[in-house]
């Protein structure tokens, strides 16, 4: 990695803790922290689109599942909370992988429907199986005083959580980017482009796609864990299909062609929603229109504007040099 | 037991009338219409408002006409211009439309559950075997039966139907053969939308109206289409009946897991027959 | 080999025996079953009865990926490449799977070196077809199945393709089975020709014999011979 790139990453990572430390209004810090949870959610959805070319309509299941696992299992104190968090993420990812082995065989829309169905299934389970999930009331998480060496009190405050979740978000993005540019990333993109040819080159195409599905579930789950730690609470709202839909929109808005696009989309979406919510109740229509406009006119999303802007700047510079 | 079967048929009939439209649209234009549930919902609400003024039957008729017109608009403004852009595009755009529709319904009719009373002409119960059964539910079954029969006759008998079936197999060749896919597309979407809208009104006395009715029926309709085989109306018919029965039996025997059953059915079918029950046949 | 699609029997008792290092052409009118035969041998078609033997080993139960790893490779009638990857990336991908690290030489061999960093979806049709072929030949497979490799190519390009195939076959000792309609290509490089019609072998032999065979001329070649 070049020095320039390394510096950019470090600067990016530093933004969160910096903002958390500076005396910005508490409400803004809290919103930004919550935005990072959505950003991780969208990152997972975007990863699936970018590497597999598949759209998931039920990813909220993987956002809320780790939280529910924590809510149900923490009181038993079988293992430390840290271990439980890791286990919850692995279980969630593992489930997605196994389901993926079946799901990815389905073509395009059938896959989408399967994911929608699983999202619904988890939601229904969360609302109906009251003795386990607390039903519509949800579950309070019995978190210990310290997690991964950090005090819970700090984690449940805007400044504290912002610093931590921002770093987690950047770290996850780094891992995802690494994966995308690796041999595995190239393989899955090839399978996405032409699954048949990949097979005729000698590759097995089932498990790589299922693995991506599993990974996207884990990434989304990380966001879900941060959310659960922050609020100390989990409810069926987190696994409702509208949450899946919003995450999908964030990913499309930001552009699924790059790894970081969905994160940008999530941050923009989140703050747009917060600012517009006080003016209008028609947020649904606004986002519906935005989705249509982006899909039809700007399919590469916000991230797609970057090369466009770069080209503009390069042209300007060339013109200026030519005149000099 | 027979009563359970009948109840299953009621929901199955409703599912079919909605899902058949989805199957047709996918078969003809490879369109995934995420707004199909919204068409159903709009029909129900329009029918609701109109029936308050002119009675149930006028309401039903109005819903059908309005939604058919909406379908023509949808086809002309969205499906046709975007048909060369890949299935993802229409999927996302119709998703956006579904969001807008939900907002519309919330704004105009509010988020509370509304009820539409059963029209008095078909109220009451009939004696069937050794128990009573609401006449209205029988009407729903009849509605579904008429819809399936008409669709069947149209698909197998008419020229347009032949074109639809041909296009389902091979859209490119059909277009080359001189089938006016544009006009055909508009007709198919209009019929599908009108049917969905009427289903909404027909279902309203039974299931009530609420803004989440769009997504509820959409999920089940998509499962029907996927299980039946994408683009196959006959497959959707069988799948709808199957799903209707499973839903009802699930409520009786395993209420907590009812919602998981359609999902399990879909997985089971896709494992055994990835192309759905009908495979490649229409 | 017998294969049926629904009620239509595509291949009926077809027997094909190709020597190592041979270039065999499969010709015949449309619907003869040539592509079907290639699909069956390469693992693309299912539900057939019969046996497929590669150097004496039965491979009929293996899937396409497994057959490729054993050295049975194919190209596609409708160009089948990875639209969003660069030329180099996809050749590298193919090479990594078969343990071949000689990416540059493949690119050079097929005249793709200058296009190495171009996205495959953006290059010219002729270049894409060469890429399709290159992907099939990465790792120097023992057997190469070609489904109308000259389709859509100009007269010049077809000639160059034919010569190239012949050179590669000799240099790398690749056994080639090609389905072709372009008779120039067929008669310039084929060692043996098999003629299929309506799922049955009509005739088999060296090009000159086939050219003169009356049944073949009537059924297919007409005045093109």
Image (tube, coloured by chain):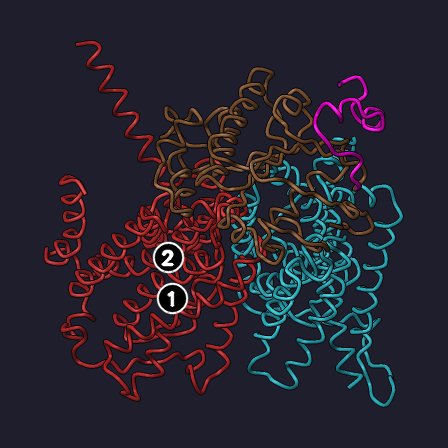
Chain colours: A red, B cyan, C brown
Quarter of the picture holding the C terminus of chain A: top left
The x and y percentages for residue C45 are: 66, 50
In the displayed structure, A286 sits above or below B13; it is above
Labelled pair 2, 1 in contact (Cβ < 8 Å): yes
Residue B197 visible? The answer is no
In reply to whether residue C179 is colored magenta, the answer given is no
* Residue found at the far right of this picture: B157
Secondary structure of residue under mark 1: helix
Residue at the disc numbered 1: A63
Is B100 left, or right, of A261 in this rendering? Answer: right
Name the chain under label 2.
A
Q: Residue at x 51, y 46 (%)?
A: C71
Q: Give, as a single range, the part of the protein colored magenta.
A: C200-225
Residue B143 placement, left or right of A151: right
- Relative placement, left or right, of A245 versus B146 is left
Q: Hey, which residue is sitting farthest left in the picture?
A: A22
Which quadrant holds residue B78? top right
Q: Which residue is mark 2?
A: A44
């Amino acid at each position: 990695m070049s020095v320039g790139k390394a510096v950019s990453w470090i600067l990016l990572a530093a933004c969160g803790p910096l903002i958390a430390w500076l005396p910005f209004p508490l409400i803004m810090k809290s919103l930004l922290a919550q935005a990072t949870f959505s950003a991780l959610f969208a990152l997972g959805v975007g990863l699936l689109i970018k590497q597999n070319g598949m759209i998931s309509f039920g990813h909220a299941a993987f956002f809320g599942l780790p939280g529910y696992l924590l809510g149900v299992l923490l009181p038993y104190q079988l293992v430390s909370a840290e271990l439980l968090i890791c286990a919850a993420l692995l279980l969630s990812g593992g489930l997605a992988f196994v389901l993926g082995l079946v799901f990815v065989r389905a073509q395009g829309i059938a896959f989408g429907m399967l994911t929608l169905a699983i999202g619904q299934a988890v939601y229904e389970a969360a609302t109906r199986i009251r003795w386990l999930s607390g039903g519509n009331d949800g579950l309070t998480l019995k978190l210990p005083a310290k997690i991964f060496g950090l005090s819970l009190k700090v984690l449940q405050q805007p400044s504290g959580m912002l610093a931590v979740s921002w770093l987690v978000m950047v770290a996850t993005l780094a891992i995802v980017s690494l994966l995308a540019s690796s041999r595995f990333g190239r393989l899955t993109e090839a399978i996405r482009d032409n699954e048949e040819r990949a097979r005729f080159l000698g590759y097995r195409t089932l498990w790589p796609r299922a693995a991506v599905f599993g990974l996207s579930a884990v990434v989304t789950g990380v966001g879900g864990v941060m959310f659960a730690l922050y609020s100390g609470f989990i409810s069926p709202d987190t696994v409702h299909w509208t949450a899946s839909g919003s995450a999908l929109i964030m990913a499309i808005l930001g552009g699924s062609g790059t790894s970081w696009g969905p994160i940008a989309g999530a941050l923009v979406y989140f703050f747009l929603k917060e600012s517009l919510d006080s003016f209008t109740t028609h947020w649904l229509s606004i986002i519906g229109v935005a989705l249509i406009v982006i899909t039809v006119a700007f399919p590469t999303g916000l991230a797609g504007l970057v090369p466009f802007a770069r080209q503009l700047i390069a042209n300007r510079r060339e013109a200026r040099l030519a005149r000099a | 037991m027979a009563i359970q079967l009948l109840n299953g048929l009621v929901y199955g009939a409703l599912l079919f009338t909605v899902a058949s439209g989805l199957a047709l649209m996918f078969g003809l234009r490879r369109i995934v219409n995420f707004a199909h549930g919204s068409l159903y919902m709009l029909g129900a609400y329009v029918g609701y408002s109109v029936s308050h003024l002119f009675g149930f039957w006028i309401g039903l008729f109005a819903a059908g006409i309005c939604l058919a017109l909406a379908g023509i608009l949808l086809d002309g403004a969205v499906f046709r211009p975007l048909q060369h852009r890949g299935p993802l595009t229409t999927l996302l755009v119709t998703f956006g439309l579904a969001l807008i529709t939900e907002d519309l319904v919330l704004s105009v009719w509010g988020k509370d559950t509304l009820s539409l009373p059963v029209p008095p002409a078909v109220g009451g119960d009939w004696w069937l075997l050794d128990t009573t059964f609401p006449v209205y539910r029988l009407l729903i079954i009849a509605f579904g039966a008429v819809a399936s029969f008409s669709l069947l006759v149209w698909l197998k008998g008419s020229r347009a139907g032949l074109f639809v079936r041909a296009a389902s197999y091979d859209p490119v060749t059909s277009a080359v053969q001189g089938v006016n896919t544009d006009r055909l597309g508009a007709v198919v979407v209009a019929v599908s939308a009108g049917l969905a809208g009427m289903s909404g009104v027909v279902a309203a006395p039974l299931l009530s109206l609420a803004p989440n009715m769009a997504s509820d029926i959409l999920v089940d309709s998509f499962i029907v289409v996927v299980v039946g085989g994408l683009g196959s109306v006959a497959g959707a018919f069988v799948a709808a009946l199957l799903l209707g029965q499973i839903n009802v039996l699930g409520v009786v025997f395993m209420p907590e897991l009812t919602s998981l059953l359609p999902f399990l059915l879909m997985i089971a079918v896709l494992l055994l027959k990835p192309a759905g029950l009908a495979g490649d046949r229409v | 080999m017998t294969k049926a699609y629904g009620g239509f029997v595509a291949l009926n008792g077809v027997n094909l025996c190709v020597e190592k290092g041979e270039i065999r052409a499969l010709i015949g009118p449309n619907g003869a079953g040539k592509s079907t035969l290639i699909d069956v041998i390469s693992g693309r078609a299912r539900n057939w009865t019969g046996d497929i033997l590669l150097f004496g080993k039965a491979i009929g139960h293996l899937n396409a990926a497994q057959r490729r790893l054993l050295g049975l490779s194919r190209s596609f009638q409708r160009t089948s490449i990875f639209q969003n990857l660069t030329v180099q990336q996809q050749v590298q991908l193919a090479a990594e799977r078969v343990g071949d690290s000689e990416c540059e030489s493949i690119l050079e061999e097929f005249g793709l070196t200058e296009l190495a960093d171009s996205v495959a979806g953006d290059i010219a049709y002729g270049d894409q077809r060469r890429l399709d072929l290159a992907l099939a030949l990465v790792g120097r497979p023992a057997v190469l199945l070609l489904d109308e490799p000259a389709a859509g190519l100009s007269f010049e390009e077809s000639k160059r393709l034919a010569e190239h195939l012949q050179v590669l076959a000799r240099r790398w000792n690749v056994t080639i089975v090609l389905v072709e309609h372009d008779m120039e290509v067929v008669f310039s490089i084929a060692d043996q020709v098999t003629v299929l019609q309506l799922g049955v072998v009509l005739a088999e032999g060296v090009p000159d014999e086939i050219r003169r065979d009356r049944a073949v001329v009537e059924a297919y070649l007409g005045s093109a011979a």
